Amino acid sequence: MAQLRIALAQVNSTVGDLDGNADLIVEWTRRAADAGAHLVAFPEMMLTGYPVEDLALRKSFVEGSLRVLERTARRLADEGLGDVPVVTGYLDRRTVSLVRAGQPAGSPLDAAAWLHGGEVLVRSAKHHLPNYGVFDEYRIFVRGDRLPVVRLHGVDVATVVCEDLWQDGGPVSVTETANAGLLLAINASPYERDKDDVRLELCARRAREAGCALAYVNMVGGQDELVFDGDSIIVGADGTLLARAPQFTEHLLIADLALPAADPALEPGKVPVDALDGTTITIDRRVLSPTPLPAYPVEPQSVSEPLDDLGEVYAALVLGTRDYVRKNGFRSVILGLSGGIDSALVATIAADAIGPDNVHVVLLPSRYSSEGSVTDAEDLVKRQGLHSRVVPIARMVEAFEEQLDLTGLAAENLQARIRANVWMGLSNEYGHLVLTGGNKSELATGYSTLYGDSAGGFGPIKDLTKTMVWALARWRNAQAGSDLAFLHPFGEEPIPEVIIDKEPSAELRPGQKDRDSLPPYDVLDPLLVDYVERDMGRDALVAAGHDPALVERVIRLVDLAEYKRRQYPPGPKITAKNFGRDRRVPITNRWREPSAE
Amino acid sequence: MAQLRIALAQVNSTVGDLDGNADLIVEWTRRAADAGAHLVAFPEMMLTGYPVEDLALRKSFVEGSLRVLERTARRLADEGLGDVPVVTGYLDRRTVSLVRAGQPAGSPLDAAAWLHGGEVLVRSAKHHLPNYGVFDEYRIFVRGDRLPVVRLHGVDVATVVCEDLWQDGGPVSVTETANAGLLLAINASPYERDKDDVRLELCARRAREAGCALAYVNMVGGQDELVFDGDSIIVGADGTLLARAPQFTEHLLIADLALPAADPALEPGKVPVDALDGTTITIDRRVLSPTPLPAYPVEPQSVSEPLDDLGEVYAALVLGTRDYVRKNGFRSVILGLSGGIDSALVATIAADAIGPDNVHVVLLPSRYSSEGSVTDAEDLVKRQGLHSRVVPIARMVEAFEEQLDLTGLAAENLQARIRANVWMGLSNEYGHLVLTGGNKSELATGYSTLYGDSAGGFGPIKDLTKTMVWALARWRNAQAGSDLAFLHPFGEEPIPEVIIDKEPSAELRPGQKDRDSLPPYDVLDPLLVDYVERDMGRDALVAAGHDPALVERVIRLVDLAEYKRRQYPPGPKITAKNFGRDRRVPITNRWREPSAE
């Protein structure tokens, strides 16, 4: 056996911020070197951030990634870190470009590089491109076809990128043939509920298949609608968990591994192998240091416990909100505080994410607001120490009513839109980012006003059912006094109990309650999950035990709301090519076109 | 040689309206049969509409398509049309499903079927899946691997689907080997400027490669952001144009073709052939009627002239607007009419699309509106016979000012948002669809108010530069008295000349002009086209002759606006799977989950 101390740098990179991300590589490599690591690994697309969407198709962006990669290799050496090999994700392109109709412009690659001695030692790229759910990688990448195997202190280390671990065939299937002693997978794998369990099982299975230990480093941080949770993992060749990083925070996971020494008969060079998925993968062997290290004392492994289910979700919302605010260059947020549970939870998440002193709330009572609404909201403001302002809307509503004779829903929507005008005005005047308070139950059923309560830049709870909103509010109150790092240390329960307990109401007409328009949430929410998230059809919903009449009603509500929810006006496309900014670009994105040289 | 009269049914199907689309198949097959056609072809995905986006992943939708396809075959026979073979696009699925991670659920196919004698004779599916620009088909389809060749009246007719024509290799490359006498391509190919020329060249080239005549039938109609222009084409084996349908209108293109008689030695059966793209295509031969028809007198061919460039664009906008309104179940539209060119052009497009009597406009003067704004707008209303209403906003602005001390841009945005509140209120009260008037120059540079002028359901001119807005307004005025079918027969120029000639202004502060904030449009627009549509980087823009300082400024404006333009609040995704309605579904979509049987 040979020893190797590896460091997995679970860091938070920002899309487009090539220089900032390169700084992170240098900074965390230094920390790893200081801890005596022999190898440091960074996540998939570390240098560019992930996902880059159609930025991958822009020539200057790919060139920027390549330039900064090489500059970073030199800089590591210049700063005395050239001896520690660094594996990092970056954006590359196929040198023999496949120019044909429909192929991504410039043949971009979701690439991995080994940096060492001031140079880029070996390059490879993701073979399996995910193109489902939140991923659209066939649009922007071409496949890699290589498995690099680098001999480091007598251990053959193979590297693959993210999806290659999730699919059968391809580079991972070749790892056993390659006789690797360690399989290193670099990832940008977004958080989903319960995914941590799936990942650990996957890593254990692939380790057994490859017949070697597996180190899995994942990105952490928020990027638009996605949150990366970290949860980096190391398992032994038998699938045993050896080390695990904490979730939702940057972390350097260091582990001393005892690994099989490489067969010296295996020479450097390239060997094509059938990858069992209809393709050929070339094993690309390099030797950095052929001999195992002299034995050294190992440090204890660290295995973090995952958070419980609600804690995970809450941590994801806090991190997602903080990174959306900060990475987009805002320092403060504003939101309407109604006295109801949704805006109360959003305010609390925001206070945890960026500190109460950066959270501004507006109370916007109308003629239909109950007295409790204002006093409950004021109680929350006081408990959390937020900035607040009261802006009654009655006079504004009257000014519209002088000109327009709106009734029913139109009159209700008017009030919601006047409120949005107020917070958008304050946002424009003072530069706060507007947070919205819509939850998934409301949004899915259309119980929401277009350009009204739904207006704003970021909706922290838009993917939570109302049931989950209540559960998280109770969970958060129960943490008062806890030392969880992602929570602000409020002295008491941050959300007044009366806000959690009151019956939901939009307060847009006298005596209005959610239950006048919607089924009770404990019946509605499970049905929404089955229809909206599990994509079950009508028959399947009824077969699963949902009330047939309710199924009819909710399908109708959701299908209608789906249409109404599309706010940005589409219009016919008539450009010569649907190119450029008509393509998809991340919102949070620091990439700036380079200046002329 | 053998004769064949073929009919290309260039029709307007609606996404999700399986029964309505099936009705169209029966109706147009009857018209073709009445005209003596021996074969009728409908567009790609005729039965489901196109594009269906993630609806393809819903089991009940695929089953609906299969059920309606078979029902339509029987119905054609029941109604005495069983002898005329019908080729149509529909949604199918691979029977041997490839269940593996990342493959589209249910293995959907973008399929083509021959219907004959009450039955589905042969099925095939698109081989090349476009996954660029507006297409994302790797997400929702798996590849077809078959080229059906059906002998009809002694002619071997091969069928392919859309993208198979655009890519090298695959079924089209096998057509010559298959000795086909006619290649029939069914398409849903969206309009792009100047695409008609590209299509004709492509058809001519593929005909020469395949060594046989080629018939190209395309969809017509608007679907959300896309417009299909029809422009169905028939070319001879040497690439000569034989027949061409008009653009932007439903049409039955009938042509008598003299085609080589099939080699009787070629027997029915399946033959796998190397498709020159790394795959194997199976030629699937069927015989419907082995013997050529007795000679019959041919009808003259019809070759429609394409519209000129501006006429094409205007026709696309009219059709796109009409179908967005009608297919989404609206009968009328509402928009704010400012007295400027943008809203004037939108009103005119709307009047052409759905008739002036269905167009409602609101004049919303503020303290900064010039007198001309109102009188010019009133002149347009009178010329076109629109419904109009004046709603002064001064009192509403004052009511906000009593509570808020907004300055600069925040104060300007407030007025734009108050106006939007008015038209959204009237939309909610009376059920009109809101049209917005933002053009691409404004939207790309952020010269627009979020939830203000940009608020609404459909933006007919959002993809036009300001330069193009003026050009189309002049083009439309010059058509007064023309008999173009897509224009309303106004007695005089529909747009007052003074509206076209006046200097652009948002009128949100005293004396404001666009040129205070933006470069002149004749300089800005070409730069926007290069940066936004052609995706050129900074160096390339300067090299192309744009002023370096202007390039800096416009890149900054566009990058900032790109962020601000994203209106719908994103938020972290934390569902167990990113499934269901979180997937992409067309806005215009008539699909309804079937009731329990």
Image (spheres, coloured by chain):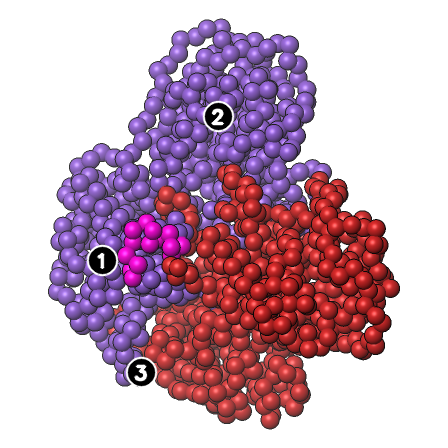
Chain colours: A purple, B red
User: On screen, B537 above or below B232?
Assistant: above
Q: Which residue is mark 1?
A: A520
Tell me the amino acid under the disc marked 3.
Answer: Leu
Tag shown at residue A562: none
Mark 2, secondary structure of its residue? helix
Q: Quadrant of the C terminus of chain B?
A: bottom left
Both on one chain, marks 3 and 2? yes
Give residue A228's quadrant in the image.
top left
Q: Residue B279: percent from the left, percent from the top?
A: 70, 41
Residue type highlighted by circle 1: Pro
Q: CA distance from mark 3 to mark 2?
A: 66 Å
Q: Position of residue A140 (x, y in %)?
A: 59, 46
Give the x, y percent position of residue A269: 68, 20
Where A369 falls versus A544 (above or below)? below
Magenta range: A537-550
Q: Secondary structure at mark 1?
A: loop
The majority secondary structure of the magenta stretch comes to helix
Q: Is residue A540 magenta?
A: yes
Q: Is residue A229 left or right of residue A294?
A: left
Residue situated furthest top in the rendering: A294
Mark identifier at residue A206 = 2
Callout 3: few (<14), some (14-19), or many (20+) C-alpha neighbours within 10 Å? Answer: some
Residue A131 visible in image: no
Pointer 1 with pointer 2, Cβ within 8 A: no
Give the residue number, with chain letter if any, for mark 3: A404
